[in-house]
């Protein structure tokens, strides 16, 4: 993804605010233009479509996960601490930007949109691959003793993370998902 301009980042931030306050169903170019105090054509000078805005949001999310993993993989901490740190930081990221959880976990949003589905798929596969890599290193170092294949264990970790966030969304963001994530660990 190319570097976003300041104006594009402001548009993305406004989009996240709309989604957070009014729901994904009210995220329209018309509502976004109104929130930004500009005309709809002014927004189209920065993004070709609503889909491009969502793709940019997902790409930013994926890049932030890359950065987090790079930091963790390079660190000297034991593998289980890397997984725990990753798990909690991902949940904290959603807690800090609840609208992001609405986008990332909105199956309906992606069901009929191949481009958005592909973006989420790539983020999911990347996350799984990196968790699996940490688990394999942990198994190699004899820090992890389990008969569960690392690939399956990575899916279990990701599944519990999704469950924590989904329950939090369904509860109307009414509690601290980071605390629940720590309890889950």
Image (cartoon, rainbow, N blue to C red):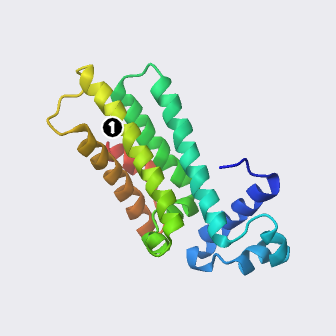
**In this figure, which residue is indicated by the disc labeled 1?**
132
Relative height, residue 76 to residue 48 (above, below): above
Circle 1 crowding by C-alpha within 10 Å: few under 14, some 14–19, many from 20: many
Q: In which quarter of the image is the C terminus?
A: top left
In the picture, measured across the screen, residue 113 lies left or right of residue 12, that is left
Q: Residue at x 44, y 38 (%)?
A: 86
Instruction: Judge whether residue 102 can be spotted in this image.
Output: no
Q: 66 or 143: which is nearer to us?
A: 66
Question: Residue at the location (24% across, 45% down)?
Answer: 152
**Residue 124 position within the rendered picture, expressed as x and y whole percent measured from the top left:** 42, 52
Point out residue 155 in the picture as x, y percentages from the top left corner.
30, 48
Query: Between residues 68 and 133, which one lies in front from this camera angle?
Result: 133
Viewer-side residue, 182 vs 117: 117
Report if residue 49 is visible in the image: yes
Judge left or right: residue 49 versus residue 71: right
Residue shown at 27% from the left, 19% from the top: 141
Residue pictured at 43% horizontal, 70% vertical: 107
């Amino acid at each position: 993804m190319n570097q976003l301009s300041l104006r594009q980042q402001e548009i993305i931030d406004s989009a996240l605010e709309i989604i957070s306050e009014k729901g994904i169903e009210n995220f329209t170019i018309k509502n976004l233009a109104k929130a930004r105090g500009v005309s709809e054509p002014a927004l189209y000078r920065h993004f070709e479509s609503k889909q491009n805005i969502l793709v940019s949001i997902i790409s930013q999310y994926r890049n932030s996960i890359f950065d987090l993993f790079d930091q963790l993989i390079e660190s000297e901490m034991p593998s289980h601490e890397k997984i725990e740190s990753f798990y909690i930081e991902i949940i904290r990221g959603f807690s800090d930007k609840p609208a992001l959880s609405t986008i990332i976990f909105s199956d309906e949003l992606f069901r009929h949109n191949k481009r958005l589905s592909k973006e989420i798929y790539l983020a999911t596969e990347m996350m799984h691959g990196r968790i699996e890599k940490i688990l394999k290193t942990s198994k190699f170092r004899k820090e992890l003793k389990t008969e569960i294949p690392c690939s399956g264990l990575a899916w279990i970790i990701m599944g519990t993370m999704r469950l924590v966030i989904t329950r939090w969304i369904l509860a109307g963001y009414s509690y601290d998902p980071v605390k629940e994530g720590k309890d889950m660990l």
